[in-house]
Amino acid sequence: MHIKRFEDAAPYEAPNHRDVVGLRLQGFEEGGPENQWVGLSQFLPSGGAGPDSTPFEKVYVVLEGEMTVETGGTEAVLKKYDSCTIAPGEVRTLENRSNHTCTMLVVIPYPPEAN
């Protein structure tokens, strides 16, 4: 078992993100998960990410607030405990259109060069 306390989660910068603070909950550390890493993203009102894509899938789970996710001309608003999977190569845009902070759990496989 590998335990990491929330107070020990280190912030990280995510490319092409704005008005967000990301904390690495698990991953990229000795004894941590071998296949994926887990982040907690806190998006301010008007914060977001993209448009962009990655060569690997991502899973988003909204814990508080709401997030508008757009892919391929389709838009969906994720609310508390809603989740979505973004496929490899799928271009997505995230935008917090509310006046509340949106807190999301993010699960992403390690990039090939990190293995």
Image (cartoon, rainbow, N blue to C red):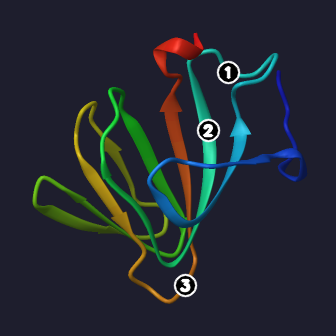
User: Residue shown at 63%/52% (left/top)?
Assistant: 40
Q: What residue occupies the far top of the structure in this picture? A: 115
Q: Is residue 40 left or right of residue 96?
A: right
Q: Residues within 10 Å of mark 3 (few under 14, many from 20)?
A: some
* Comes first in the chain, label 3 or label 1: 1
User: Residue shown at 24%/33% (left/top)?
Assistant: 89
**Amino acid type, label 2:** Val
Residue contact at pointers 1 and 2, CB within 8 angstroms: yes
Q: Quadrant of the C terminus?
A: top right
Q: Which mark is residue 38?
A: 2
Residue that badge 1 annotates? 33
Residue that badge 3 annotates? 100
In the image, residue 22 above or below residue 114? below
In the image, residue 19 above or below residue 22? below
Q: Residues within 10 Å of mark 2 (few under 14, many from 20)?
A: some
Q: Quadrant of residue 51?
A: bottom left
Looking at the image, which is closer to me, 2 or 48? 48
Marks 1/2: CA–CA distance: 9 Å
Q: Is residue 54 left or right of residue 62?
A: left
Q: Which mark is residue 15?
A: none
